[in-house]
Image (cartoon, rainbow, N blue to C red):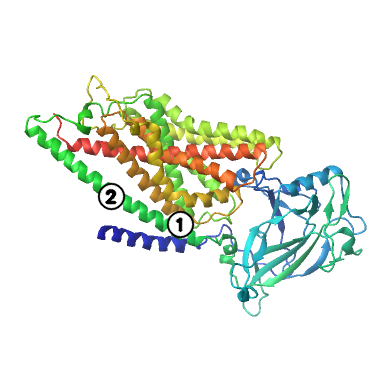
Amino acid sequence: FSFLQERLRYVLGLLLLLHSTDSFYVPGVAPINFHHNDPVEIKAVKLTSSRTQLPYEYYSLPFCQPSKITYKAENLGEVLRGDRIVNTPFQVSMNVEKKCEVLCNLPNKPVTLTVEESKLIAERIREDYYVHLIADNLPVATRLEFYSNREEEEKKKEKDVQFEHGYRLGFMDGNKFYLHNHLSFILYYHREDVEESQEHTYRVVRFEVIPQSIKLEDLKADEKSMCTLPEAAGSAPQEIDPTKENQLLFTYSVHWEESDIKWASRWDTYLTMSDVQIHWFSIINSVVVVFFLSGILSMIIIRTLRKDIANYNKEDDIEDTMEESGWKLVHGDVFRPPQYPMILSSLLGSGIQLFCMILIVIFVAMLGMLSPSSRGALMTTACFLFMFMGVFGGFFAGRLYRTLKGHRWKKGAFCTATLYPGVVFGICFVLNCFIWGKHSSGAVPFPTMVALLCMWFGISLPLVYLGYYFGFRKQPYDNPVRTNQIPRQIPEQRWYMNKFVGILMAGILPFGAMFIELFFIFSAIWENQFYYLFGFLFLVFIILVVSCSQISIVMVYFQLCAEDYRWWWRTFLVSGGSAFYVLIYAVFYFVNKLDIVEFIPSLLYFGYTALMVLSFWLLTGTIGFYAAYMFVRKIYAAVKID
């Protein structure tokens, strides 16, 4: 156990190091310095709702528009996420207060919403949509203050503050809809140190909004587009009646406050996860469990194997006095090539491609280079890395295909380059058609789709062919024993050697090690949260690799002891068992955490979940397969066989 303590001490040291990298932030852009009265541009990103999962662009609703609408050029990740960044008519200047200003139309001519527009706004309010704006690349947040469950005396003093991304479009009271038509922007600036003769420069470090709903009659506006806000107690909210035309004014106010927050740490409010303790607890729990099991499994397997190998090698000296039993019996069949070797090697090639991509993405993100401030960087990096990792995928697939006595390497390379990406593209295309039908900005535009296809056939496919060619030409893996001409008969297997039972048993340990992290990843994807704990994720990934390898080795050992040598496909399927639990967890999350009721959002959820589960199965199956293959070659190399 002193060995286990050493490992734990090492892991805790690593954890502390990882935790310190969480708050480290390599900004996506250089800081912008503003002088007094410089314009600070406020842009709109999109409207989102966790109930429908369909983002819409800002001007899909009848908001006030500037004289000229300009969209920002976007990277691949932003397009895939449904961001459509566009300018807005809000006039905000650095450190200049505005009490209340009418946004568009003169005060004596309020905005008139048609029945159609009123219906649309009411529907979006019912679907719980949030509006996302950015100022100097900082997303807007709504401050939520609530009293935590402390003692009564302390309640008066302390409030817990949390931030919600974006602001609610409106709210419902009974069957009535109310629109937030007045926005109070609160911007925080940090005054930079400059020499005495120079003018002060400021940097934007936080962007908050307090949305309000104020009836047209209560907003007293003059000819200069200025308005006065009513007293909070006596004002009525602005109702939107979906059955008739509605008149209202869009107004806003701007308030500036000085802040001590430095520009480098301005994202901290958005990234402060309230549940870091849970992460620590879950990670330490997983680490302890996995290392404890590793210790036990390694001891059992190594001791049993030593005994087996010693017995088998001793038996040779006593001239077969004892009947052979156990895994040595199948030595003449254990390396017999399986059915469909091309498909197996293709899937494993895609698994290697995924493994390399995920490892690099998580590692780079852990160093802080893919922070949320550089929008869409994570998605873009993942797409490009997957394309370029085709070399490694092709190489491993080609070498394995050669080992399994395959001859048609060109067909094998084509299969590797198209099988998994083809399934992903097919599912995404079908889902995209549904999103197009809803006119959502989440639909991938046709030019982007063509660009992705060009990347697939122009970058990924040639690279897979290149890797496959070199892998196929390389010496095949060296199998330590020869394969017999005639396959031996497989004895009848016990019920617990069934494939499905194996999948259930093998999936528990890897899934248990990572399921808390899965909750945070699901929240980031489906509830518009930021995910930024890549230090934890990297550690979870390592734990996943270790636990998949161990379980796979144990399962293949039991299978060979039961004299069943058809382990190639089975190991690949069984090692991916945790994907089955991910699927069950996704269903549980859908039922308990999300209130999605409509057909298309449900279809999107399960479509993307199917892709995640498939990718996860390929990843864990590949890890398990290679661990088992190395193990099988090791043990058969250790026994003396005539």
Q: Position of residue 205 (x, y in %)?
A: 63, 66
- Element under label 2? helix
Give left or right: position of 255 versus 103: left
Residue 400 found in image quarter:
top left
Alpha carbons under labels 2 and 1: distance apart: 27 Å
With 334 as the anchor, is 287 left or right in this view? right
What type is the residue that disc 1 sits on?
Gly
Residue 190 in view, yes or no: yes
Closest to the camera, between mark 2 and mark 1, is: 2
Instruction: Identify residue type, mark 2.
Output: Ile
Where 478 falls versus 221 (above or below)?
above
Label 1, residues with CA under 10 Å away: few <14, some 14-19, many ≥20: many
For marks 2 and 1 on the same chain, the one whose residue lies earlier in the sequence: 2
**Residue 296, disc:** 2
Residue 424 x %, y %: 53, 34
Find numbered disc 1 in the image and state the secondary structure of the residue it sits on: helix
x and y percentages locating residue 497 in the rendered image:
33, 32
Between 392 and 640, the residue placed more toward the observer is 640
Residue 289 versus residue 354 in the image, above or below? below
Q: Is residue 124 above or below residue 25?
A: above
According to the image, label 1 marks what residue?
535
Report whether residue 65 is seen.
no
Give the quadrant of residue 199. Answer: bottom right
What residue is at 21 percent from the left and 35 percent from the top? 636
Which circle marks residue 559 in the picture?
none
